[in-house]
Every structure is written in structure tokens, then in C-alpha cells.
Amino acid sequence: MSEVPDREAVGTLLRRVLEVLDGDVAAVYAQRGLPDYRPRFSPPLRVLVADGPLPIRDLARRVGVTHSAASQTVAQMARAGLVELAPGADARQRVVHLTDRARALLPVVEAEWAATAAALRDLDGELPAPLTEVLRAVLAAVRRRPLRRRIADAGLPPAP
């Protein structure tokens, strides 16, 4: 898809940008013989390397995603042979452990992470403001005043 969404279609534009960026990183992994490795695996992988095995809830908090998103990513990582789940302190808790395969991939993942960070700094040079700064500013603004409140303030009548 080469069409750029309307300026007002912010959600569509954000998804498209993420799709393009993630697609390029996934292509880098595929070129290195890792077609089943997804860019979304790197943050949890790096946290597990740094902190050791963690319950999914703690992993989600450390990565900065919802429990549901972390569960979905962990399930994908388990299918790819990167993590194993073990029972936790109670029947509801599952603890995520890295596999030997994940540990073997660490040099490739770390090299990609560093190269991607450098590539994003290069991309920032072409933007009116660094991408991460803009995204952090957006998050801070919607935490101060959520978009749903802004929509109501813009004149949308209350639901019946």
C-alpha cells in the first residue's frame, strides 16, 4: 500500500508508520535467517536477559505494554521457541523463561538493536523533531487530558 491516509486519520497513519518500520526491521531479521523473529520480541527478550525469568504481569510492566499485549507476544515467542512458560507462585501466574535458542540469538538481536537505534537517529535528522520525543510528548499530552475528553470538548454530543 503506497497511499498515505488523510491527515485526520491519525490512527491509520500511526499504524501505517509502525507497519513500515516493523516491516523493515523484520526484513533485516529474515535476511539473517530468522524469518520467524518479530521486532516486538526484542523488548521482552532484552528485559528477560537483564532481569531473568519474570511473571507475564511483571514483564508487561517492565516493557511498558498491557498484560494482554505481553501475553500475546509471549505466546508468539513460545511458538518461535524463544521462551518457555512455567507455573508461578499461584495457579494463575505464568513465569517466562528464555530458551537456549533465544540466548543463542542474542548477538544478532543486540547487533540489530544497536544498528536500528543508529538508523533511527539518522531518520530523526530528516524530521522536524526526533520521533521518540514527539511520541513521548503525545503520550504525556493524552495522559494529562485524554483524547476522549478532547473529543467531548470538541462538541460531540453525549451518547443517548
Image (tube, rainbow, N blue to C red):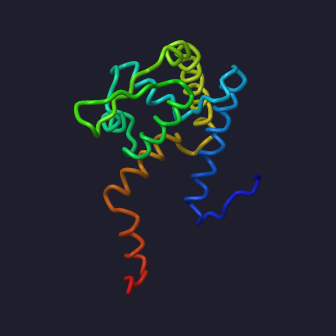
Residue at the far right: name it.
2
Please identify the quarter of the rendering in which residue 60 is found.
Answer: top left
In this rendering, the answer to whether 148 lies above or below 13 is below
Depth check: 63 or 143 in front? 63
Q: Position of residue 34 (x, y in %)?
A: 66, 23
Depth check: 123 or 49 in front? 49
Depth check: 88 or 155 in front? 88
Please identify the quarter of the rendering in which residue 105 is found.
Answer: top right
Residue at the far bottom: name it.
160
For image coordinates 39% across by 68% down, the residue present is 148
Q: How many marks?
A: 0
Please identify the quarter of the rendering in which residue 3 is found.
Answer: bottom right
In this rendering, the answer to whether 33 lies above or below 126 is above
Q: Position of residue 67 (x, y in %)?
A: 37, 44
Q: Quadrant of the C terminus?
A: bottom left
Residue at the far front: name it.
91
For image coordinates 42% across by 81% down, the residue present is 155
Q: Is residue 44 left or right of residue 111?
A: left
For image coordinates 46% across by 34% down, the residue present is 74
Q: Position of residue 61 (x, y in %)?
A: 33, 38
For image coordinates 37% across by 55% down, the residue present is 141
Q: Position of residue 112 (x, y in %)?
A: 59, 22
